Image: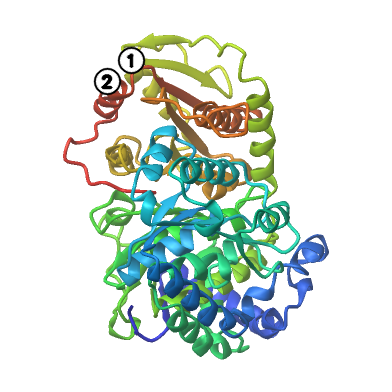
Amino acid sequence: MTSSALGVLASGPAGEAVSRHVAALVGDRFASRLFAQDPTLWGPAAEAEASVRLSWTGLGRSSRPLVGEVAALRDHLREQGVDHVVLCGMGGSSLAPEVICATAGVELTVLDSSDPDYVRAALADRLDRAVVVVSSKSGSTVETDSQRRAFEGAFEAAGIDPAQRIVVVTDPGSPLDKDARERGYRVVNADPNVGGRYSALTAFGLVPSGLAGADIEELLDDAESVADLLADDDAANPGLVLGAAIAGTDPLRDKLAIVDDGSGITGFADWAEQLIAESTGKDGTGLLPVVVDGDDDPEVAWPAADVTVARLVADVADEQAPSPDDATGAPRSEVRVSGALGAQLLLWEVATAAAGAVLGINPFDQPDVESAKKAARAMLEGSDKAADEPAFTDGAIEVRSLGGDWLGSATTVGTALDALFDQLDRQHGYVAVMAYLDRLADAPLAGARRAVPPRTERPTTVGWGPRFLHSTGQYHKGGPATGVYLQVTSAPHEDLPVPGRDFTFGTLIAAQAGGDAQVLADHGRPVLRLHLTDHDAGLAQLTQALGIPSSSPEGQG
């Protein structure tokens, strides 16, 4: 892991935002009150939620007992030849362990999907050597419950006692906590006063990472080493600087293009995406992270007037301010950030909390995530009903539109895409590609991230469903009404039952996609739904229609 000093350097409009807002944050004693867990920082409406969501500020110290507990469990399992770690979890429960393990160079299989083909592949991979970590804060997350049931069935079919191979991480007293203890599973309780997306340094982040072989003590050391700096009411506090830089531009640059530029941290932007989008995307405002691959990506090469570039570098002390924009000569809005992984996890959490104060929103609730869950449950209960007729079928793709009468005379996938993109706000809009597919096997579709912006001249995100519902899904519905939404679903190669339930993984992911699209439409957002009736043929057809090169790099989003 990188050991560079924690630092933030803002320039252009982002630098002006720092000058404009940090003094007020210091004057309000925001940092010291945050670390004292003062729930009044975000106003009366947020106080009740904030009062039970601020323990993350002290995790560098309070999570220490997990180091020895996880090491002992890892050694016990490895003595039995169990060394393949699978994590079943969604949102913050899976994204933090993913970046921790990727950065440490240790293997972790993350199962954060309802796609039957994806689930089946995980079940078939080294089951005889697998330990499965089932992570759910609420204990009622439908994806995680379904994944747990699938692994229980697979273990039993293989003659393996699930109680010897399943480790549960959940809040004390949750339905999963009670059920797991009754079944004799190992249970590790997480701090209940930490929200899921701020839980990187709780048991949710540390148990799977430690079992996989990551040095979780080093993570806690790095976080604790910067806690006093981040709690200091000083204009140089990097948490305040970063929060002001990303949320305080005027007018607000509400797209944050995150690019790694030699930080030594792998996949950090995916974790930051869910932290920022789900925390800020509400009340018609918020920040939309755009995870990009490098300087050649359109959002970085020619950033629009509503984009700030966040660059993850090796050491900001070695950095110089970026050159002016080539086209306009105006200074680029950019912020550069460096630091060890554990330190940056805490830094971005502090910055997001500060951004919430600057934006005037509650950074700890997620009201529109629950609305999508309710819609999915309703569709699941009515899954035996026939699907709505498509507007038309083009080859192996059924085309449907929601959120207004905008499809017009389109009769092909290409003209339907044109009609969707015509709905874009050319100054403030964005395109969200939402693929309810296998994010590993179908990874080339992530090439839409780079293929669409030259066509629309607007930022584009790619999210894999249902994973993104616990991330950018909140921003899609609660943030500014400036997005257009391309949803891709498919008939699986082969469906997979959920043991003990009257639905399959195929019907579950279809209900989640349908519920998400319906809630977006209810919010007046234009949604183009493309359903691949033949997975392989439809995917090839869509890839061509989007202009994705056949050699497009893979991404997980």
Using the image, determine if residue 125 lies above or below residue 436: below
Q: Amino acid at mark 1?
A: Ala
Residue visible at 69% across and 56% down? 365
Q: Splitting the image into 4 quarters, where does residue 454 fall? A: top left
Relative placement, left or right, of 80 versus 20 is left
Name the disc covering residue 94, or none.
none
Judged left or right of residue 115, residue 538 is: left
Question: Is residue 41 or residue 134 the one in the foreground?
Answer: 134
* Above or below, comparing residue 377 to residue 553 in the picture: above
- Dot 2: within a 10 Å radius of its alpha carbon, few (fewer than 14), some, or many (20 or more) residues? some
Q: Is residue 521 above or below residue 428?
A: above
Answer yes or no: do the residues labelled 1 and 2 have beta carbons within 8 Å? yes
265 and 6: which is toward the camera: 265
Q: Residue furthest left?
A: 551
Type of colouring? rainbow
Residue 361 in picture, x, y percent from top left: 69, 59
Residue 348 in view, yes or no: yes
Name which of mark 1 and mark 2 comes first in the sequence.
1
What percent of the width, then of the height, locates residue 537?
27, 20
Q: Which residue is mark 2?
A: 537
Residue at 31% x, 65% y is: 260
Q: Which residue is mark 1?
A: 396
Count of marks, rendered view: 2
Q: CA distance from mark 1 to mark 2?
A: 6 Å
